[in-house]
Amino acid sequence: MEYAGIGGFILLVLNVWAIISIIGSSASTGAKVIWTLLVLVLPLLGFIIWLIAGPRSASA
């Protein structure tokens, strides 16, 4: 699947935000690695799954 234009840029920004939130969460290191890989390998689907079920940031 190819992401181009403004939609691809928005998805990139959302994925970067998700990865930063995953790294800043209080989850275990293994969980952080799995969530990060999910977001990187499946950009759109991984982001949606993380948004629904992913670890929350430490500031939440």
Image (tube, rainbow, N blue to C red):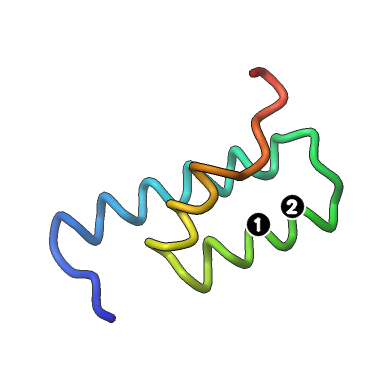
Q: Amino acid at mark 2?
A: Lys
Q: Residue furthest left?
A: 5
Task: Tell me if residue 14 comes above or below residue 45 in the rendering.
Answer: above
Image coords of residue 21 (percent x, y): 60, 38
| x 49%, y 60%: residue | 46
Relative to 25, residue 41 above or below:
below
Residue shown at 50%/53% (left/top)? 49
Quarter of the view holding residue 60: top right
Residue bearing the label numbered 2: 32
Q: Dots 1 and 2: beta carbons under 8 Å? A: yes
How far, Cα to Cα, is label 1 from label 2?
5 Å
Q: Amino acid at mark 1?
A: Trp
The quarter in which the N terminus is drawn is bottom left
Locate residue 14, reporting x and y percent: 39, 46
User: Which image quadrant is residue 54 in?
Assistant: top right
Disc 1: which residue = 35
Outermost bottom residue: 1
Image-based side of 7 in relation to 26, left or right: left
Rendered residue at 65%/57% (across/down): 35
Q: Residues within 10 Å of mark 2 (few under 14, many from 20)?
A: many
Judged left or right of residue 2, residue 55 is right
Q: Quick one: which residue is furthest to the top in this view? A: 59
Q: Residue 11 lies in what quarter of the image?
A: bottom left
- Which of the two residues, 53 or 38, is positioned nearer the viewer here? 53
Residue occupying image coordinates x 14% and y 55%: 6
Circle 1 — which element? Answer: helix
Would you place residue 36 above or below residue 59 in this image?
below
* Secondary structure at numbered mark 2: helix
Q: Residue furthest front?
A: 53
Which x, y percent locates residue 47?
46, 53
Which disc is residue 57 wearing?
none
Q: How many marks?
A: 2
